Amino acid sequence: MNNLKKLGVTALAGSLAAVSAQAGEMSMNGSANMTYYTTSKSEGKGIGTDKGLTVSGSGELDNGWTFSIYTYFSDALAISSHATSLTMGSLGTITAGQAFGGNSGSYDEEVPQAYEQTSDRQQNSANQVGNWMDNGGLTWVPPAMDLGGLTVQAHVGFSPDADDAATNNGSVGAKSGTWGTGTDLGLTLTGLVDGLTVGGYVATRENEDPATTSHSHDEFNGTWYAKYTMGSVSVGYSEAYYDSGIAGTATAATTAKAIGTSAGIFENQQMSIAFNVNDNLSISYTESEDTYNAQASHDNTDIADVEQSTEALQAAYSMGGMTIKAFQMEASNPGWDSNATKNTFSEISIGLSF
């Protein structure tokens, strides 16, 4: 009896060891921020706080493929974004999730900046390019290709219903009645010149019901950028194009516009320069010019274009797990409204990570 008992215990221990060898790893990290913010807008000024937690995990399959997952919880401990990735060796990596940035996150506003992108406080069209592809879709990143010293990295995406509806717990969004499939493609090139990176991205989604909605054609977004780093200095330039496919009379120059709902085309240009003073301190200056091109109204009366311009000076200093960041920003014609008052924004943030 004792021998049988020992045999059973030994078999159980062996079974647990086999399971343990296949099991993945889980980890948790988080961040907390305290921010002093002032603006000339109606929000006024004050001190804000926020925190977030990220739970992540990874593992390996019998064939050598690996997988990883993450879920980010916002300040209210609500799920803000999540993604699951499967890396299949020479076949590349497939990712699915909700609000995880998709492919567009690697291409929009890709100019060097010490702190946040300028859209963090003043929205622009470059930040919206292809952002409806990261809910309920797939991204595929194949292995980078070496073409005689030129390295090409592709990013491919597909969404069966690109209405940007965020869901959780395995559910899918309801049929929007307007948007059909969405696709996007990005290419990043390095090796042309030492320190130079060039990228281009396009995204489109199908309009399934142009006869009964305000949308007259498929939506098309695109952007490209170039960044060059030499020692401690980086410079960058980018352009973006946003056509939501909306028909109807264009919005007047003196009326605020909304990206994705206003008829017309948005075009963005950004340029920046960043300098790493040392390993801990960096500063940057960014200019963004975002033009709303109203096109012509139905009675062929031209409407003047409106240019929303933004300038931002930023700085960041890190010491271990703490980072101090600040910016001073000014926006003219905010909301692409030629009558709007100029806005100024100032922010100082202390961030802690663990």
Image (cartoon, rainbow, N blue to C red):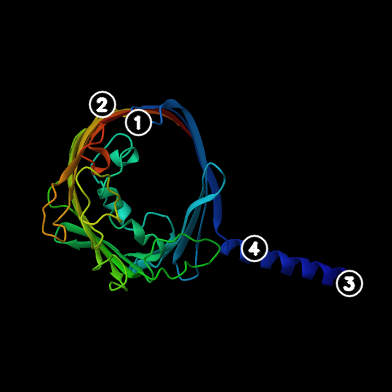
Mark 4 to mark 2 CA distance (whole Å): 51 Å
Amino acid beneath label 4: Ala
Question: In this rendering, which labeled residue sits more in front, label 3 or label 2?
Answer: 2
| x and y, in percent, of residue 37 in the image | 40, 27
The residue closer to the viewer here, 125 or 109, is 125
Is residue 28 toward the left or the right of residue 218 in the image? Answer: right
Residue indicated by mark 3 = 1
| x and y, in percent, of residue 119 in the image | 30, 42
Tell me which numbered mark, 4 or 2, is placed earlier along the sequence: 4
Q: Quadrant of the N terminus?
A: bottom right
The residue closer to the viewer here, 18 or 56, is 56
- Dot 1 falls on a residue whose secondary structure is loop
- Dot 3 falls on a residue whose secondary structure is loop
Question: In this rendering, which labeled residue sits more in front, label 4 or label 1?
Answer: 1
Tell me which numbered mark, 4 or 3, is placed earlier along the sequence: 3
Mark 2, other Cα within 10 Å: few <14 / some 14–19 / many ≥20:
few
- Dot 2 falls on a residue whose secondary structure is loop
Residue indicated by mark 1 = 41
Q: Which mark is residue 155?
A: none
